[in-house]
Image: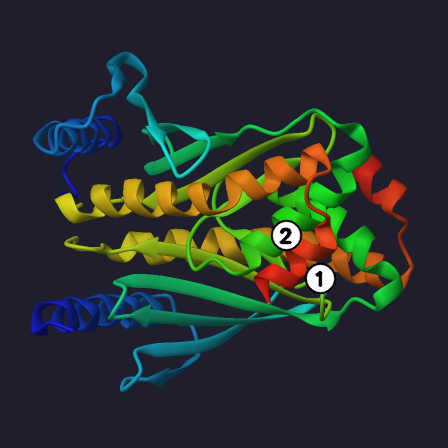
Amino acid sequence: MAELSKVDQAQQVFDKMCAVLDAREWKYESFPEDLTIRFHSIGDDLPMEFIVIVDSERQLLRVMSPVPVDDNKNKRLDLAIATCVASYGLSDGSFDYDITTGHIFFRLTVCFRNSTIGDGLFTYLVGVSSAVVDKYNDKFFAISKGLLSVDDFIVSEQ
Amino acid sequence: MTEEKMQRAQRTFATLCQNLDEHDWHYEKDEENLEIECGARGEDLPMDIRIIVDADRQLIILLSVMPFVAPDTKRLDVAIATSIVNNKLVDGCFDYDVTSGHMIFRMTSSFIESEIDSEVFTYMLMISCHTIDEYNDKFFMLGKGMLSINQFLEEN
């Protein structure tokens, strides 16, 4: 693997990811020029969107998922706490909260420098990201709407 | 757990130890549990780093416990600061327990069905040390009341 350029290795990872998703008959949009794919999924409640980026320069595979919440400025401090509480219980990935815009993203990253990535890793990335976002997106949405207090959320996580 | 998963975890652990040896890192090794502990000195606060190769979940988990606990009166400020910092990171995150005030930096990488190169450990250690060193003193000062959340916002 060491003889491959960063660009070649990133392309190889991107091609493999698409092949794995194709084999599992996942529907996704592909943006090969950006080494990016996007797909949607229906969870138990809210729809979920996932963007997977193969970052050639940094040799990273990044999964990002925007979490839809109500743009309620009065709930931004509550959501800052709630995203901390949710992330604290995770073994991989985290919820990033932009307190200035109110946007929440789930983020999961894998470095593939000189490494050989197996099919199972792509399945893991999609599976874990989907499960985590599905578990918390309705709770964040409810907090943003004032339907769930942050204190009740903290108690539910303990 | 299958034999294949255990063997892959042991190979990953051996690659980690080889990487640390090559870079002359001093570390303590627990071969039975596939864990190492090491320390690093940043510009200010010391950093304790623990790396676990989780054979069952096929994960490399790097953890660094921050050497302070935020008092009750500062927990909202530290939660806001944690959000601001995590939102800027590409990999890894600061996990903040709002009920106890403890904070841990965490970076995880999966090696399911994969062969991880030594370079991945160089990356994990380099990025983790850099990120922790950049922010640990700011979290510390915020928790101690030496830096206000507004000052933190201005700086970040």
User: What is the chain letter for disc 2?
Assistant: A
Q: Amino acid at mark 2?
A: Cys
Mark 1 to mark 2 CA distance (whole Å): 7 Å
Above or below B146: residue A113: above
Amino acid type, callout 1: Val
Helix, strand or loop for disc 2 = helix
Q: Is residue B90 above or below residue B43?
A: above
Query: Which residue is the site of mark 2?
Result: A84
Q: Is residue B89 visible?
A: no
What percent of the width, then of the height, locates residue A36?
Answer: 31, 22
Q: Residues within 10 Å of mark 2 (few under 14, many from 20)?
A: many
Q: For numbered disc 1, what is the local secondary structure?
A: loop
Q: Which quadrant of the figure contains the N terminus of chain A?
A: top left
Res. A52 image quadrant? top left
Say left or right for A81 vs A54: right
Residue B98 is tagged as 1
The circle drawn on residue B90 is none
| Snapshot quadrant of residue A145 | top right
Q: Is residue B156 left or right of residue B2?
A: right
Q: Are marks 1 and 2 in contact (CB under 8 Å)?
A: yes
User: What residue is at 45 percent from the left and 49 percent from the top?
Assistant: A93
Q: Position of residue A79 (x, y in %)?
A: 69, 42
